[in-house]
Image: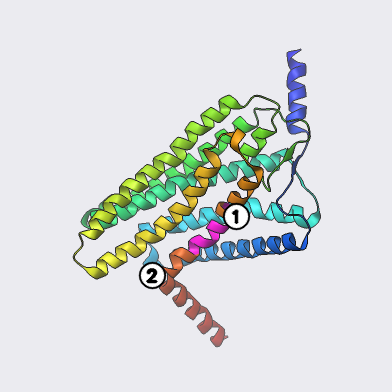
Amino acid sequence: MKSTFIMTWANQTFNSDFILLGIFDYSTTHIFLFSLILGIFTMAFIGNTAIVLLIYLDTQLHTPMYFLLSQLSLMDLMLVCTTVPKMAFNYLSGSKSISVAGCATQIFFYTSLLGCECFLLAVMAYDRYIAVCHPLRYPKLMSPQICGLMTASSWILGSTDGVIDVVATFSFSYCGSREIAHFFCDFPSLLIISCNDTSTFEKVLFYCCVIMIVFPVAIIIASYTRVILAVIRMGSGEGRHKAFATCSSHLMVVGMYYGAALFIYMRPTSDRSPTQDKMVSVFYTILTPMLNPLIYSLRNKEVARAFMKMLGKVKSEEQVT
């Protein structure tokens, strides 16, 4: 009897594809919006790739702040590649299916990268706090070893969250139409179509979100409170302007990222609207990764200098050939 139940559950959960209902139809307006999304994806892909390569190739950017920025760009690059290519393939091919393995892969990378960014943004705030409030101790407190350890911890903690979410999500059975009202596999959307009672998992998920989102936010708020107080007390107008320019870029990213994440993951399933979830998901999985390189490059003279330097090298090489 028990073995029969296990086989039935396995057949329900793993032997049938899920159906992604998507976000666009084939009307003229939606074709335009789909093209717009592809354009944003292309800009996000190119922008984040450029940031990673610039920081890797330019030795003057081999500092903790820019190393952390390169990791943020790498996470954003992986995030857009987790959701958009599958969405585009399904839309262009007319197919809406996604295999269970593909769905689990999307959930793992999606939740892992969101978790990684949560912790990394807190590390970036701590880095700015040390740079502004304890500049003489900065080389020691943010040495390459410590910076690397904090970055690795962000990746590990985020990946651990991804594994937990995948295992928990697929511990439930899914039957019926198996239609996911989203353009990618997001585990809150899967819980809605589960055949089981998921209320206990939703409570655990809420507390996990408190740790993954609220705790890093608390670190960011505490760090920037100290930074702002230190900047106000600065005697040099130039130093105050530089500190504000650097920190304001980070605060813009934090505001966009955490605002959307809090909206998506700290609401009960009963209060969810598929349309709202899809719109907000587009914002912080596609639009935010595109905006991050623009915010940091346009407001950062060192990144802009490195970009112009690299561009000059490419042009000179073309002239020689």
Rendered location of residue 164, percent (x, y): 55, 33
Tag shown at residue 187: none
Tell me the residue that label 1 is attached to: 80
From the image, which quarter does the N terminus lie in? Answer: top right
Farthest residue, direction bottom: 319
Label 1 Cα crowd, 10 Å radius (few <14 / some 14-19 / many 20+): many
Rendered location of residue 308, percent (x, y): 46, 77
Q: Secondary structure at mark 2?
A: helix
In terms of depth relative to the viewer, which is nearer, 166 or 227? Answer: 227
Q: Is residue 185 visible?
A: no
Q: Residue at x 47, y 67 (%)?
A: 54
Tell me the residue that label 2 is attached to: 302
The boundaries of the magenta stretch are: 285-293
Q: How is the image coloured?
A: rainbow
Count of marks, rendered view: 2
Q: Secondary structure at mark 1?
A: helix
184 part of magenta stretch: no
Above-or-below relation of 35 to 74: below
Rendered location of residue 175, percent (x, y): 76, 30
For the residue marked with disc 1, what is the amino acid?
Answer: Val
154 left or right, relative to 205: left
Above-or-below relation of 220 to 172: below
Rendered location of residue 231, percent (x, y): 25, 59
Above-or-below relation of 260 to 16: below
Label 2 Cα crowd, 10 Å radius (few <14 / some 14-19 / many 20+): some
From the image, which quarter does the C terminus lie in? Answer: bottom right
In terms of depth relative to the viewer, which is nearer, 46 or 60? Answer: 46
Please, what is the dominant secondary structure of the magenta stretch?
helix
